[in-house]
Image (cartoon, helix red, strand yellow):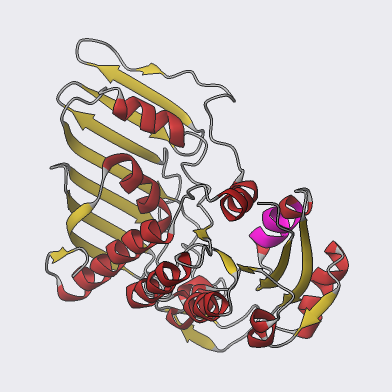
């Protein structure tokens, strides 16, 4: 089906400006009609930069416009549910930024709306996270080939020292009102991990906030409460029987390798998330780097994949179903940290 995609943007954040807008503009039959940002001034700036004809100040009016058939959502997570549900009810296709939603209840509401809209052949897709992206297909291949044998252990580590300086102003991702239950890179990494190794059954988590209050803005003497953790440690049980350990931190200066490392009865796989280098070793053999080139690497084709799904009905990833999984995981982590108890995922 040849369809001109007339696109409206709600929240033209960094990835919209660096990826979505320029990439959509290069695809035949895609045109941007209107943008709505947090202020008219910021919306007008984006419109001028990318040649978008109209600036809206009310996202509800933009979503309801009859001359649009696609809505790209680049807002903070607190708005994802409301904009998605409204857009789908208005008959639009939706590409939504990750993290999927403010909390798991919002995510399930988005999925329900997506399932209803699917009957009318409306496409919903989440933007994938960049971490672990390039080696995605290689990881899937190695696991399918049985390099691990029976999987037994999984270690996920994503750490840096970016939050050590308590004098730095608070960032919106540290404010629950905007970020919801999302924390550090938790959901961003759980999404590919569960695609590779399957779902998580139960978690036991601890979190820490090193600096309880930060300046509300640069140069301000007003302090604002930090509501999202600087450090997360998780023990998890997976459906396939693996025991998993996650470590996320903004407090780890010179932390070293950020990695996904899996072990099984027949071998191991290590994915260096910083360099996108992958290593594998079978029993009786030393681990060796897995050579893969552009032909096997996963490339950024998000916008083209979305357009193909609209026109040809091809499947998308991450889907809303995948997003709900990492939101349920994030919710279980938060409840476990709050209660000090093990929590089953999805309950």
The residue at 63%/86% (across/down) is 60
Task: Give the quarter of the image for residue 256.
Answer: top left
Q: Position of residue 336 (x, y in %)?
A: 19, 69
Does residue 269 appear left or right of residue 171 in this picture? left
Q: What stretch of residues is rendered in magenta?
A: 15-22
Of residues 166 and 35, the one drawn nearer to the viewer in this rendering: 35
Q: Is residue 288 above or below residue 21?
A: above
Find out whether residue 21 is within the magenta segment: yes
Does residue 187 appear left or right of residue 40 in this picture? left
Of residues 131 and 216, the one drawn nearer to the viewer in this rendering: 131
Q: Main secondary structure of the magenta part?
A: helix
Of residues 111 and 15, the one drawn nearer to the viewer in this rendering: 111
The residue at 65%/77% (across/down) is 218
The residue at 71%/72% (across/down) is 68
Q: Position of residue 305 (x, y in %)?
A: 59, 47
The residue at 42%/75% (across/down) is 102
Would you say residue 186 is visible in this rendering?
A: no
Q: Position of residue 296 (x, y in %)?
A: 52, 26
Would you say residue 346 is visible in this rendering?
A: yes
Does residue 114 appear left or right of residue 73 in this picture? left
Q: Is residue 252 above or below residue 46?
A: above
* Quadrant placement of the C terminus: bottom left
Q: How many marks?
A: 0
Task: Give the quarter of the image for residue 201.
Answer: bottom left
Find out whether residue 223 is within the magenta segment: no
Q: Is residue 223 above or below residue 87?
A: below
Of residues 235 and 192, the one drawn nearer to the viewer in this rendering: 192
Q: Position of residue 174 (x, y in %)?
A: 46, 73
């Amino acid at each position: 089906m040849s369809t001109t995609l007339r696109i409206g943007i709600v929240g033209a954040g960094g990835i919209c400006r660096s990826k979505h807008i320029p990439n959509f503009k290069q695809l035949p039959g895609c045109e941007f009609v209107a943008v709505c940002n947090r202020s008219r001034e910021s919306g007008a700036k984006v419109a001028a930069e990318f040649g978008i004809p109209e600036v809206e100040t009310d996202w509800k009016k933009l979503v309801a416009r009859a001359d649009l058939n696609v809505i790209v959502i680049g807002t903070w997570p607190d708005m994802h549910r409301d904009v998605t549900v409204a857009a789908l009810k208005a008959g639009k296709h939706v590409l939504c930024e990750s993290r999927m939603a403010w909390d798991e209840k919002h995510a399930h509401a988005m999925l329900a709306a997506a399932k209803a809209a699917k009957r009318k052949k409306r496409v919903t897709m989440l933007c994938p996270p960049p971490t672990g992206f390039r080696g995605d297909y290689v990881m899937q291949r190695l696991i399918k080939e049985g390099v691990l044998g029976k999987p037994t252990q999984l270690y996920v580590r994503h750490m840096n020292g970016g939050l050590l300086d308590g004098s730095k102003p608070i960032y919106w991702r540290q404010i629950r009102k905007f970020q919801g239950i999302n924390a550090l890179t938790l959901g961003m990494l759980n999404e590919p991990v569960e695609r590779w190794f399957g779902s998580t059954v139960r978690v036991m988590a601890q979190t820490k906030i090193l600096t309880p209050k930060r300046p509300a803005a640069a140069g301000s003497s007003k302090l604002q409460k930090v509501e999202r953790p600087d450090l997360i440690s998780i023990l998890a049980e997976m459906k396939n029987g693996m025991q998993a350990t996650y470590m996320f931190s903004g407090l780890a200066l010179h932390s070293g390798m950020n990695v996904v490392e899996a072990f099984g009865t027949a071998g191991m796989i290590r994915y260096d998330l910083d360099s996108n280098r992958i290593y594998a070793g079978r029993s009786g053999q030393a681990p060796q780097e897995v050579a893969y080139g552009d032909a096997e690497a996963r490339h950024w084709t998000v916008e083209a994949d979305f357009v193909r799904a609209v026109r040809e009905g091809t499947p998308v990833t991450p889907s809303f179903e995948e997003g709900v999984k990492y939101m349920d995981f994030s919710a279980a982590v938060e409840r476990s940290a709050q209660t000090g108890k093990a929590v089953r995922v999805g309950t």
